[in-house]
Image (spheres, rainbow, N blue to C red):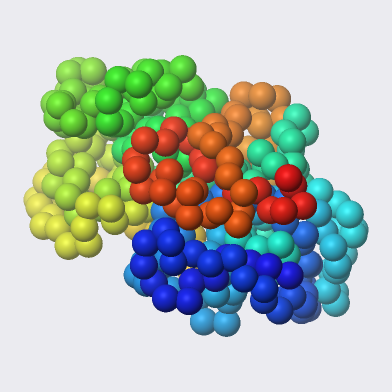
Amino acid sequence: MHAITIPEPGGPEALVWAEVPEPVPAEGEVLVEVVASAVNRADLLQRQGFYDPPPGSSRYPGLECSGRIAALGPGVSGWSVGDEVCALLVGGGYAEKVVVPVGQLLPVPEGVDLVTAAALPEAVCTVWSNVFMIAHLRPGETLLVHGGASGIGTTAIQLAKAVGAKVAVTAGGPEKLERCAELGADILIDYRRQDFVEELSKATDGAGADVILDIVGAKYLERNVQALAVNGRLAIIGLQGGVKGELNLAALLGKRAAITATTLRSRPLHEKAAIVAAVREHVWPLISAGTVRPVIHTTVPMEEAAEGHRALDSGSHVGKVLLLAPQAV
């Protein structure tokens, strides 16, 4: 089979479509023939040599995919060869085939085509686990989403609105903010020319955000705490703005606030399986009903994954960038 390899870290040109050994499913795994994968920020970091896969996992990038089950490993039940699925991966999605732990498989939701389903697992599992399972966003509360036009952001807007929350977003420029508004965002903040703490305070009569979903990290840490409501929860899931910041503990104490920070890729199998099960129970009905829909920016052939990385690198995208495997074209 073929997969995208990274012989040497570097720019998008470091991604090489090459012939590689076909993986074999072990106990509790299935082999999926990939139809599509999606480009995530973690893939860009891996390409640059900054985010190695966990030991023992696939060396190829790709944290999610959709496709058809090609073979079942020992001990697998409840799935059959030929089933159309999407999957949360630790790596290996940029390939013609990938092995997946059975607990990380999801059926393709009703009303979603097989290619589009590749846009769902990573974003939905990230948002549901952080915003709902950890931060416990409730109806009537306010969620602030940084990077509202990203794959994570477009998913978070829709899920928060589906449970009756108010949504504020930051994004770069009026076009992106308009797309966020179309998805249901109530408070639109252009981070290039507006201060999100001030704008959020105005829009909420000084209350602030009950939950903040943050992809920026250190650069926003102090202002995120300022923007939190009393009993607010800050969920950090990215470090695009640096890894070291200064935290005013008195401000945190005064608001009785909490900060959590998680990654999805490195979690143990049982935790990922619990998140996937919760997503199937709570989110899949919303997707099947059309309440939540994946937002696709563009699709490119998997062999040209470099173009997909350039699209994400440019920062001009809204939603997900998909890579189509040869069998999907």
Please tell me which residue is depicted at 10% across the width and 52% down the height of the picture: 248
Looking at the picture, tell me which residue is in the foreground, 12 or 28: 12
Image side of residue 194 versus residue 162, left or right: left
Image side of residue 13 versus residue 125, left or right: left
Please tell me which residue is depicted at 73% across the width and 45% down the height of the picture: 329
Please tell me which residue is depicted at 14% across the width and 47% down the height of the picture: 222
Q: In this view, does 32 lie above or below 131?
A: below
**Residue 125 place in picture, x, y as percent:** 55, 49
Image side of residue 114 versus residue 135, left or right: right
Which residue is at the far bottom?
56
**Residue 183 place in picture, x, y as percent:** 48, 22
Whether residue 239 is visible to the viewer of this picture, yes or no, is yes
**Which quadrant of the rendered structure holds the N terminus?**
bottom right
**Residue 146 place in picture, x, y as percent:** 32, 38
Whether residue 272 is visible to the viewer of this picture, yes or no, is no
Q: Is residue 204 above or below residue 279?
A: above
Please tell me which residue is depicted at 61% across the width and 54% down the height of the picture: 302
Looking at the picture, tell me which residue is in the foreground, 53 or 256: 53
**Residue 324 place in picture, x, y as percent:** 65, 48
Looking at the picture, tell me which residue is in the foreground, 208 or 328: 328
User: For the image shown, how many numbered marks are present on the structure?
Assistant: 0
Q: Is residue 173 above or below residue 10?
A: above
